[in-house]
Amino acid sequence: MTHSNDSSPTPRLSGLLTRLIDRDRRSDYLVLALFAAIPVALSIPMGLFWSRATEREIAFKGYADAPNFWTLVFLLPALLWLIRWAMNRIAPVSREWPPSEEPPILALLDTPAGKRVAYEGLRRWVLSPRVATAALVLAVAINVIDMSGFLLADYINPADPPVGAYDWRNLHRSGLISPSANLLFALVAYTVQFAMVWLGCLCGLLLLAHNLYFLRHVYQRRWVPDGQEDHFFEINLADEDRCFGFREANSAFNTQIMLLMGGGLMMLFSRYQYSATWDEMKADPTAILPTVGQVMMVGGWFVGLCVISLPALVKLLPRLPFIGNQRASRRIGSYLLEFMSPRRWPFGLNPRPEEIAALAARFASHSFWPTGNNRGAQLFFFALWIGQIVLIAPPLDNPPLLAASVLTMGLIAWGAKALIMGALHSSLRYVDDGLVDPPSGPLPELRLPGRKLDAGIFVSYRRQDSAAYTGRLYDYLSDHVHRDQIFLDIHAIGAGEKYGDVLNRNLSECAAVLVMIGPRWLSSVSDNGAPRLADPDDWVRAEVAAALARDILVVPVLVGGAQLPSPAELPADLAPLCDRNAFEISDTRWDYDARRLMAQLRGALDARQRTAG
């Protein structure tokens, strides 16, 4: 497959966003650090850095005593690094096709064509100029609101001089610096804060774009045209992890949780720079949140929690009117039908009630959160717990009160988590109890097309002959067969293990063997010039001979234009291979042939299992 330099007819990408999430732009960290250092450098000659006493004997709180500003020299580049790290794990979309690193949600798609369509769509959503513009508007609004208080009190309509202490925003009122110089410095300092706020808003909107794209592209019959099912994330009710088959993309969702927790720690640091003491809180309850900026920061935390929680709405999608699509019917059969394309719907046009009940039981056994309800419950609990601490910032000067407050907040978070999970379940009960209550015993027996195979598959190949083809087929098989059920030597044999013992053990346990035959499979020779297949100790010969000796499925897979050898060309123990129906995978129709091979493997192994049963 050839690489393209974004020559496909996709919308023009935002150059700024592309640069911001590009990990190779390491010089940006230095630029941001220098930018954040400008107010620090200005504060020194202006006398705004060190604390001192004024002529009025009122203490001056210097710039060095405002860590929320001077620490931005480190925090601003650190935030950019954190965004890049997170986006590289969630949606690395600034690269060519095929990307060197796939966005995790692409693992939920079966075909390369579907992956490419989804990749281009995700890139359009995440790198949309609207994301950067919305972040800019939010950052401007937040900073205007945050600055309005001090501008009004100290410059536009100044009241009496501050009581107790001057700070770097109003030192001009002490007469030690001119109002214009003081205002210029304050505006420069707030410009650095603006950059920090803009990056924070941008991070939240990037996650919002990713999560909305995921929800919008979970398969729903009401909005997916026939023939485009491969471009959407279709739930898999046969998933043994009971996560609809979405756990393969867990890094995209779990990284968001880590990002939220990391942001919470940074907010705690900021909050405790302005936190009130116990005496101050008793005297004035409003001292809990002393500034408008602190209030907005706490609000931003809970908005971030809502954004990261969006994937939990997967089960409720049929009742959500996305982009003009009407809600699905509340009848349980119609509700379940929304999630399953014709190729995966296990019934005909008139399913029996017991069949719908069995399907609903499968649906109910799966999680709301893509990586499991336990992980989702942990997210809500810890996020709500940290959120309360950020909101109230219990005083550090009263240890008993601090411990009691943190414990009480934990109990409240636990109860709130239970309410959230209960609300999600109640939303499904609104349709039918069968979508919520899984059976107490084993799940009902149900044939579900599209499930992953549990039968072991052994892949025999010769590296000098078909390594590239084998690796490509392995990647395709991994989407349809559990990886631990596929034996490929480079993945399955660990350091120090005996090669022969591992091969024999896996051959004895597998249900099918794929013999990869390329142009040099028959003619390959050893270092002394002798044909490899003529050597009884040749590993490929030993693998194929052992497979043929067992009553298992053996499929010669022809790649690279190879032909199946005749019995006369093979050693006696390999001659029965010619009696097996060979399957050719052509370079020009690889995807089509690979799907046919997978379908035939599935059918043959299912037939053998039914016969054995």
Image (spheres, grey):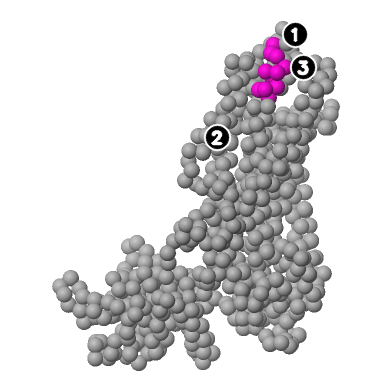
Residue 29 in the image: state x and y as whole percent.
Answer: 51, 37
Task: Name the mark on residue 263.
Answer: none
Callout 1 secondary element: loop
Location of mark 2 (residue)? 32
Residue type beneath disc 3 = Gly
User: What is the spatial separation of the Cα atoms under label 3 and label 1, in whole angstroms?
Assistant: 11 Å
The front one of 566 and 548 is 566
Q: Earlier in the sequence, mark 3 or mark 2?
A: 2
Residue type beneath disc 1 = Arg
Q: Nearer the viewer, mark 3 or mark 1?
A: 1
The front one of 97 and 415 is 97
Residue at horizontal 70 percent and vertical 71 percent from the top? 223
Position of 7 relative to 523 (above/below): above
Residue at horizontal 69 percent and vertical 74 percent from the top? 221
Q: Look at the image and tell me in which quarter the C terminus lies.
A: bottom right
Region of the chain picked out in magenta, as a range: 176-186
Q: Look at the image and tell me in which quarter the N terminus lies.
A: bottom left
Location of mark 3 (residue)? 164
The front one of 148 and 276 is 148
Badge 3 density bin: few <14, some 14–19, many ≥20, Cα 10 Å: few
Callout 3 secondary element: loop
Location of mark 1 (residue)? 56
Q: Are marks 3 and 2 in contact (CB under 8 Å)?
A: no
Residue type beneath disc 2 = Leu
